[in-house]
Image (cartoon, grey):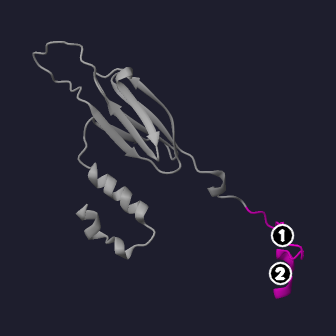
Amino acid sequence: MTGVHSLFPRGSFIGFDHLFTELEHVAKHANDHYPPHNIIKVDDETFLIELAVAGFSKDELDIQFKDRTLVVTGEHVSKGRDFIHRGISTKKFKRTFRLSEHVEIHGADLVDGVLAIDLKFVLPEEMRPRKIKIGKSEETKNDTTNTGTSQLLNETS
């Protein structure tokens, strides 16, 4: 992709290869418009991807998730009908979505020709903000000198 490389030369950025890979993926799939889709933010942790898949049954759709990539594919099985006019497209498709490392898929459903995929942003406990109590310091397991925060504060006063 010359667009990403010319804007941000890789030689100037060290350790950002994953970011360039993501940008190249987005640029490569920027013109993928079939099937039409919505991405809805329900709240701060919940998202919904809706794909318009009229004419497809559950058996003709496949959803897979690997390496933070959600792939939805559809392949319509012809019923041998003779169309005079075909306005509802049932062409084969493969739609990909890159997800953040903390986004989990919580299910999918097909209702009225719309495939809805439920996503949740789940921040691990160790990354969540935590409240620090004032007045008592935690001692580390390797600290045998019993030097606490209150002793250090008294020495500087």
* Percent x, y of residue 141: 84, 66
Q: Where is residue 61 in the image (x, y as percent from the top left)?
A: 36, 27
Q: What residue does disc 2 label?
A: 152
Specify the amino acid type for callout 2: Leu
Which quarter of the figure has residue 49?
top left
Q: Which of 138 and 75 is in front in this view?
A: 75
Dot 2 alpha-carbon crowd within 10 angstroms: few under 14, some 14 to 19, many 20 or more: few
Q: Can residue 157 be seen in this view?
A: no
Residue 64 in the image: above or below residue 154? above
Viewer-nearest residue: 77 or 27: 77
Residue 151 among magenta residues: yes
The residue lying at 28 percent from left, 34 percent from top is: 93
Q: Earlier in the sequence, mark 2 or mark 1?
A: 1
> Judging from the image, what secondary structure is the residue with disc 2 in?
helix
Count the labels in the image.
Answer: 2
C-alpha separation, residue under disc 2 versus residue under disc 1? 18 Å
What residue span does the magenta drawing correspond to? 132-157
Q: Which amino acid does label 1 sit on?
A: Asn
Q: Which residue is drawn at 42% across and 60% down?
A: 18
Left or right: 107 with respect to 77?
right
